[in-house]
Amino acid sequence: MSFIDDIRLASKFLRDRILSTALTILSVASGVALIVWLQGVTGGVREAFVRHATPYNLIVGAPGSPVQLVLSGVFFLDRPVGNISRDVYEELKNDPAVDRAVPIAMGDSFRGHAIVGTTKEFFDPLPGEKFPLRLRAGRLFNGNFEAVIGARVAAETRLEIGAQFRSSHGFSGGEQHAEPMTVVGILEPTGGPRDGAVYCSLESIHEFHRHANEYAESGGTAAPNQMTAVLVRPKDLTALPLLQRQIQMSGRAQAVFPTSALYQLFDTLEIWKRVVQVLCWTVVAVALTSVCITLYSFVEERAADIALLRALGASRTRITRLILIQSLLLSLGGALTGIALGHGLMAVLGGVVQSFTGVDLSWSVMTGWEGMILGALGATGLVFGAWPAWRAYRVAAAEYLA
Amino acid sequence: MNAVERGSLVRVENLTMRYTGAPKDSAPILRINQWEVGRGEQVVLLGPSGSGKTTLLHLLSGIRAPTAGRIAVDDEDISALPESRRDLWRSRTVGYVFQNYYLFSALTTLENTEMPLMFAGVAAAERRAMALQILERLDLSGKISSHPRQLSAGEKQRAVIARALVNRPRLVLADEPSAHLDAQRRRMLFELLRDLVDQNGSTLIVATHDPELANLFSKRAAMGQFR
């Protein structure tokens, strides 16, 4: 019971100095919020990107950066590496080891959303696919210049079935095509990058660029015998390494495992994450020093109160415990506030990331980290409270009680 | 009935008190060969400021330990007790009214009053009942949720008395308890304190430099004799 009494008493002493208590908690919280935010961003983005990578096991594109191929061909975030010959697609399609090969042709955009030329197979769900594409309204494209738009495109552009729009050359608002596109279908949201693209037939893309010779120079798909990439799903996963090696050996294209390329990207960023992490923990350490200073000031300013506690029968051990509990309350209060702030930041950032990438960030990956932060802050809070607690232990009651 | 007939509650023998770190051959602050206070007695310690009244009260409460000698309260040699046991003994045996109000600003009147009971290990419900009872006797029932800054000087002093008496101590020590009050209120407070202590059957030792207040007590000890 005495421990509960001590917690109540310690919290009342802290509440009595509400301003310094609030500022101390806030300083700890700001450091913790940064750590939570950083961990959430890196962990959440990594997890979400891998989760939404693609239901296909291989992406085949022009030789160059594997990461760029994945970012452009799967997430529609980057410019295409280049074009590959239609022959590569035909060979893959007819390969007995391949279950499905879906071509994509890119190079145009509409208000920042990529225009993706593909076949109707792109919309067929694959066995075990977590986020299959489903029509919310309308139908798939049949003729030229018919478009199916992702859920995010529909939400941002407010295009409805039957609406017409003009796409532009390139990815950043180039010259508009003369031929308008007509919306014939709207997809349900998947929470992934495919929500942020406009889909049409390969023929539409090629038709757009019949006369656009300059377009080929920008990396876009200009000729009917060219495409940006092919998404590949093998019949048997064990055939995948051999398939990849064959394509690599051909020299005409590169074959990339999307998740491997993403891990490669995140591993490259890991060193920067570590650097920022060290900076964040330094901020927390500095903030914990403020816990120490706050409590030391309390002991100095309220030595008479401590003496009175002693006079009323509190042992030195109990006084020490009261100060350590205050230290614990400050550091854990800071940790909990910081975790809440960090989550708030992530919620805001989640919206920003989704608006740019279409990837719905899930923050459930943070659970283990939060427990670790609470434990670490609790332990270091006790360490930082030790000095003021020792000072309180040594207060001589008689000196302060006239 | 005198102290011998009632039996001694406080017995001081061969006590010497010097400042911490003072040389052994320096003059002591206090030197008491033998001094006794009987059970239920009310004694006033009379002496000017700096005469050692507060130090003696600290010694009798176990807040300080003597340089040499023996202090027994209710046959318990408190000078021989280790500090941690002396703390517990104090919370259960002694009620202390300080010269300054010394109320915790963070706590309400009720919480301030409960404090000695908390350190004595009394359960929460029981200590609340005991605190409410003494606050009612001191006409502070309407102020139980008030913080010290919301109390008048007289209310603060009554709250301090409530805290000192809440654990029904055998020994009540009061150090210039009415220093901040005018003459009329001072006298009223003294009488209230004496009545309450008398009803509890406690022993009261009051330190004051005011001869007029000292006249209220039949037994007086001049601090000059303890040098």
Image (cartoon, coloured by chain):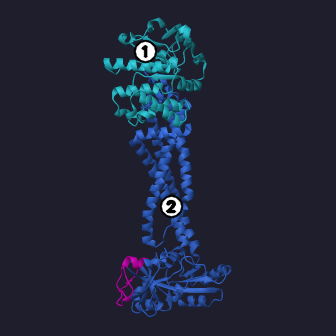
Chain colours: A blue, B cyan
**Residue at numbered disc 1:** B207
User: Which label number is shown at residue A249?
Assistant: none
Q: Which chain is mark 2 on? A: A
* Position in image of residue B224 (x %, y %): 44, 6
The answer to which of A11 and A118 lies nearer the viewer is A11
Q: Which chain is mark 1 on? A: B
As drawn, B163 above or below A128:
above
Verify CB contact (< 8 Å) between mark 1 and mark 2: no
* Position in image of residue A34 (x %, y %): 46, 55
**Residue at numbered disc 2:** A40
Q: How many other residues sit within 10 Å of disc 1, few (<14), some (14-19) or many (≥20)? A: many
Describe residue A166's horizontal placement relative to residue A116 as left or right. Answer: left
As drawn, A232 above or below B131:
below
SS category of the residue bearing label 1: strand
The residue depicted at 42 percent of the width and 48 percent of the height is A26
Which span is picked out in magenta?
A152-181
Q: Is residue A374 magenta?
A: no
Q: Is residue A386 visible?
A: yes
* Position in image of residue B216 (x %, y %): 39, 11
Q: Is residue A178 magenta?
A: yes
Q: Amino acid at mark 2?
A: Gly
The answer to which of A177 and A23 lies nearer the viewer is A23
The residue depicted at 58 percent of the width and 79 percent of the height is A56
The residue depicted at 52 percent of the width and 76 percent of the height is A70
SS category of the residue bearing label 2: helix
* Position in image of residue B195 (x %, y %): 43, 19
Q: Amino acid at mark 1?
A: Ala
The residue depicted at 58 percent of the width and 18 percent of the height is B78
As drawn, A394 above or below B219:
below
